[in-house]
Image (tube, helix red, strand yellow):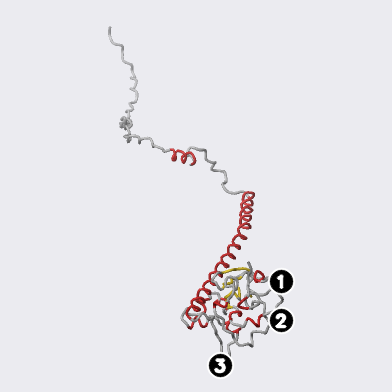
Amino acid sequence: PPPPPSPAHPTPPPPHHPTPPRQHTPPLPRPPAPRPPATPIHDPPPPPPVYTPCMQRLKRMLPRHDMPRPRSGRRLGFTIVELLVCIGVVAVLIDLLIPTLGTSKRKAKIVGSQLTAHQCSLLLDMYLTDYREVYPIASSDTATAVTPGEASRLWYQPLVLAGYADSVAQIDPDSIKAGKATYRMSIALAYDDALMIPGNTVAPWPQVISPVRRHEVRYPDSKGSVYQYFVVGGDPQGFWCCLPVAPTGAVAMCDNSVRSGPWTAFVRESDPPVENAIGLPVYTTWAGRVGRDIWP
């Protein structure tokens, strides 16, 4: 057929809009594939421990690690009641121990005094062996006559001069604290026994010494030779004779044995009262060299 006739006014074509170019987006990288876990290499298990019966008992006594522990929020420590109970127990123990410690200290002091008295007795025995068995005679003034009181108070001087000791402190260690000699020799070993009889006594202070030999002592196991005149560190401390509250002192006998006790232990109730300072225990024994300070 013939084409249609063209219109007088042709229709314009639609406007052309160009399409923007498409941007290229690179692809996202893929995460790496997970690796299979490596197989750990373990050491061979240790052999089970071998417990002896003693170790088994010890293991049962020790705390276990799998035991439940206290909570972290709980406060650990003593309560006031527990603290008071502990203080009370400690106070009771101290109350029980203090008397024991005091008794031990007193006993140690008595033993030390006995050792010192025994040492004095041994030195005196050596002096008697070397000097015709005559008990030492000492005086503070060589121009005057020797009195029994000075011989008793300064009995250690002949021993020091003879070389048996270097000083009185070596014979009597307590003299350092007391500032004087604390052991004395019995006046009965430097005085006439005829003047130490009840009713016939004479005070020994102004009298002249009467030397006494060792074999003239009738009862060497019962007559004291050196005694503790002043007790240092005792309970109480002070003169051994003759106070109402008497400390325990040491007394060395003429046979080198040692006794200890208060001065009342060396006095009998049947003894006559002290007369002209005669009759004091050990110091001025009744009957002198033939008397006794202890009785069987």
Categorize mark 3 by other alpha carbons within 10 Å: few (<14), some (14-19), many (20+): few
Numbered disc total: 3
Mark closer to the observer (3, 2) = 2
Q: CA distance from mark 3 to mark 2?
A: 33 Å
* Label 2 packing within 10 angstroms: few (<14), some (14-19), many (20+): few
Q: Which element carries disc 1, helix, strand or loop?
A: loop
Residue 273 seen in this snapshot: yes
Q: Is residue 35 above or below residue 277?
A: above
N-terminal-most mark, 3 or 1? 3
Disc number placed over residue 54 in the picture, else none: none
Q: Where's residue 9, x and y in %?
A: 34, 19
Q: Is residue 238 visible from the viewing direction of this image?
A: no
Quadrant of the image occupied by residue 257: bottom right
Which residue matches tag 2? 199
Q: Residue 145 at what x, y percent from top left? A: 58, 90
SS label for mark 3:
loop
Q: Amino acid at mark 2?
A: Gly
